[in-house]
């Protein structure tokens, strides 16, 4: 029934909210929004299971804002969040959605003076976004009354469970009116969360958005096999080779996080750590610095980083292999957001090979051995015969790409050697190298790239420009021209960026098609 709704217009928001959405540049609702907003607007309880970055805040936030009465000064809605960072993030998002409404949204969280939060509550709050502990505290000090809180949201519920907050959550729920509407969002649904929903929600509509395969597909995944002892050196080598714009380095423990931060700092790298042992103030500082692009590398534990909306991360490095495939998908989902290409590199010890295979299987994805950029160029796809003729290329058979994807998939020996489609031969590599030299020698500093897709795959000039900007981090003035033909395209860019563009875009997906990008003969 809700399947047909695809635009925001169909969801029928009030003009003020629609205006805010337009100003944010949201073009269409995300799947969790498509499925979650109508039942919430209709007054149902909703359980939404979806990964980070799927747009849950607007999914509950907009129906909540539609429900509120600005003339009623009571607290009409609460949002419970597990951590201070999420509390702030949700508050900021809700405020942007409420930009043109007369609604007060107050954030209350631990680690900040309670007095000023009490003052804010006194001066009127329609919505309170809170961490569990601070909300409990404010209730017991009678600074917060929930008798009119008829719209209740539990955001990232499974993380509340991880942090041991569930009992307090239940206490808070019991203080809200029994006729309330409750929305629960969670990335996973462990039994205690299910039980919580069963005992505190009324006939909920359950929505589960399975992680889009696409999300992982847009991410180029590699692994590095190295014994524990050699890890830091290898990491330094990889960071040098990859030169990420921004990277998150995941580690398993808090101690591991501080140790890695220290080691990288000692090597002169620009790094900060985010983990549960840090004071809230420090964590905030780290987040602000990282989001403001003032720090290149963030070392983080899963708990500290979960749920945070950090976009534009070019690289995810699993310095420690995650414990489960689910966490793997969760972690690497922080790169390649919204169709951008990203890169994920996972460290394994020789004993962890089988765990890696399991992740590949569970996430139905392919993780290839990491290669330095030089190695990658050697393994570039074969140049087409057209190169010798100097004429415009004879397009490749479209099908060949799809085949190579299948052939590429899980074969054990594809891991050991070839990282790209299995269609590259030793003879080809020599030519690919020559192609690369030509770029460097290009007299006018412009390199021409060949892309094996065009109109026929639904690719437009804007798509390619977008991919160059977002995927290869090129600036507009580094893109000289983009020409889309029927079955392939040509792109002219600054020669200095060619290697990077090929590296980031070759093998990535655009409009659902895998694209091959290579340097074309001028
Ligand atoms: P989640 O809570 O599921 O992790 P968020 O609500 O934090 O996701 O949203 C993630 C990002 O996606 C935010 O930057 C948000 O502004 C953006 N976003 C949300 N909905 C849309 C949409 N419909 N179109 C484009 N971007 C969106
Ligand atoms: Mg969220």
Image: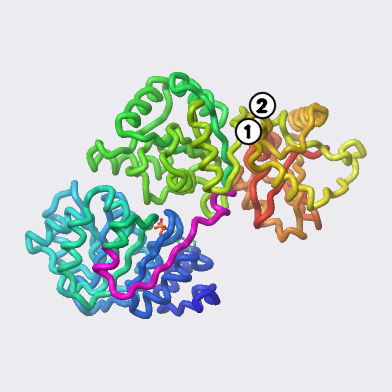
**Magenta span contains residue 203:** yes
Helix, strand or loop at label 2? It is helix
Residue 154 highlighted magenta (yes or no): no
Residue at disc 1, CB closer than 8 Å to ligand 1: no
Q: Within 10 Å of the Cα at label 2, are there few (<14), some (14-19), or many (20+) other Cα atoms? A: few
Q: Nearer the viewer, residue 504 or 275?
A: 275
Left or right? Give the position of 362 relative to 452.
Answer: left
Viewer-nearest residue: 420 or 112: 420
* 427 over 108 or under it: above or below: above
Residue at 25% in and 70% down: 77
Q: Which residues are magenta?
A: 196-218
- The residue at which mark 2 appears reads as 374
* Quarter of the displayed picture in which ligand 1 can be seen: bottom left
Question: Is 378 on the left-hand or right-hand side of 368?
Answer: right
As drawn, which residue projects farthest toward the left?
141
Residue 291 visible from this viewpoint: yes
Q: Which mark is residue 415?
A: 1
Q: Is residue 104 visible?
A: no
Residue with the most extreme right position: 389
């Amino acid at each position: 029934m809700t399947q047909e709704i695809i635009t925001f217009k169909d969801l029928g928001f009030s003009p003020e909210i629609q205006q805010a959405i337009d100003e944010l540049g949201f073009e269409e609702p995300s799947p969790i929004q498509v499925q979650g907003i109508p039942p919430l607007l209709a007054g149902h309880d909703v359980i939404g299971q979806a990964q980070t970055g799927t747009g849950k805040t607007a999914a509950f936030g907009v129906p909540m804002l539609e429900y509120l009465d600005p003339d009623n000064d009571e607290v009409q809605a609460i949002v419970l969040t597990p951590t201070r960072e999420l509390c702030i993030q949700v508050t900021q998002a809700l405020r942007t959605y409420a930009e043109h409404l007369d609604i007060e949204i107050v954030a209350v969280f631990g680690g900040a003076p309670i007095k000023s939060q009490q003052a804010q509550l006194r001066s009127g709050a329609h919505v309170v976004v809170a961490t569990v502990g601070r909300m409990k505290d404010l209730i017991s000090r009678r600074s917060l009354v929930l008798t009119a809180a008829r719209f209740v949201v539990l955001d990232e519920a499974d993380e509340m469970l991880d942090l041991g907050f569930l009992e307090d959550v239940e206490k808070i729920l019991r203080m809200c009116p029994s006729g309330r509407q409750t929305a629960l969002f969670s990335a996973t649904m462990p039994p205690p969360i299910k039980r919580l929903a069963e005992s505190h929600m009324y006939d909920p509509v359950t929505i589960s958005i399975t992680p889009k395969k696409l999300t992982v597909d847009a991410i180029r995944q590699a692994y590095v096999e190295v014994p524990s002892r050699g890890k830091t050196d290898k990491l330094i080598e990889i960071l040098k080779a990859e030169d990420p714009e921004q990277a998150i380095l995941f580690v398993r423990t808090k101690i591991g996080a501080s140790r890695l931060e220290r080691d990288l700092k000692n090597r002169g790298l620009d790094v900060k750590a985010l983990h549960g042992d840090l004071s809230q103030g420090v964590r905030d500082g780290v987040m602000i610095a990282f989001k403001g692009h003032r720090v290149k590398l963030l070392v983080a534990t899963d708990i500290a980083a979960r749920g945070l909306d950090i976009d534009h991360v070019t690289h995810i490095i699993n310095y420690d292999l995650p414990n489960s495939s689910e966490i793997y998908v969760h972690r690497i989902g922080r790169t390649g957001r919204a169709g951008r290409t990203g890169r994920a590199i996972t460290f394994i010890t020789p004993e962890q090979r089988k765990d890696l295979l399991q992740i590949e299987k569970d996430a139905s994805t392919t993780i290839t051995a990491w290669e330095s950029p030089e190695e990658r160029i050697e393994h570039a796809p074969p140049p087409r015969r057209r190169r010798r003729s100097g004429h415009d290329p004879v397009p490749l058979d479209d099908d060949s790409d799809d085949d190579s994807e299948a052939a590429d998939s899980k074969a054990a020996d594809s891991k050991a050697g070839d990282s790209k489609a299995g269609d590259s031969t030793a003879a080809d590599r020599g030519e690919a190298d020559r192609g690369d030299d030509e770029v460097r020698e290009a007299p006018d500093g412009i390199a021409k790239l060949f892309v094996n897709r065009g109109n026929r795959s639904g690719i437009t000039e804007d798509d390619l420009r977008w991919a160059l900007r977002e995927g290869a981090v090129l600036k507009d003035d580094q893109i000289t021209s983009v020409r889309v033909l029927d079955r392939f395209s040509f792109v002219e860019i600054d020669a200095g960026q060619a290697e990077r563009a090929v590296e980031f875009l070759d093998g990535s997906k655009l409009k659902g098609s895998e694209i091959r990008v290579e340097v074309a003969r001028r």
